[in-house]
Image: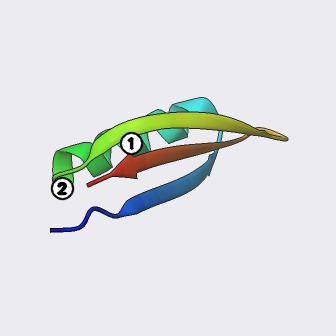
Amino acid sequence: MKEALGLVETKGLVACIEAADAMCKAANVELIGYENVGSGLVTAMVKG
């Protein structure tokens, strides 16, 4: 089966951590990392 890449952009690091935690617990995905985009926006990246 092919893997997919998922991105979620949030305002603030705490919201990003909460979103990544929910994604990892709800589906068979793993966190690749996160990136500070600027102006308080943070993007979480998952694959699976």
Cα separation between marks 2 and 1: 11 Å
**Amino acid type, residue under disc 2 in the picture:** Ala
- Residue drawn 64% across the image and 36% down it: 35
Q: Is residue 37 above or below residue 8?
A: above
Image quadrant containing the N terminus: bottom left
Q: Residue 28 placed where, x, y %?
A: 16, 52
- Residue drawn 27% across the image and 62% down it: 3
Q: Quadrant of residue 26?
A: bottom left
Would you name the residue on which mark 1 appears?
20
In the image, 42 versus 14, the foreground residue is 42
Q: Residue 31 placed where, x, y %?
A: 36, 38
Image quadrant containing the C terminus: bottom left
* Image side of residue 39 versus residue 16, left or right: right
**Amino acid type, residue under disc 1 in the picture:** Ala
Q: Residue 27 placed where, x, y %?
A: 18, 56
* Image side of residue 37 versus residue 21, left or right: right
Would you name the residue on which mark 2 appears?
27
Residue 7, which numbered label? none
- Residue drawn 60% across the image and 53% down it: 9
In the image, 30 versus 8, the foreground residue is 30
* Image side of residue 47 versus residue 44, left or right: left
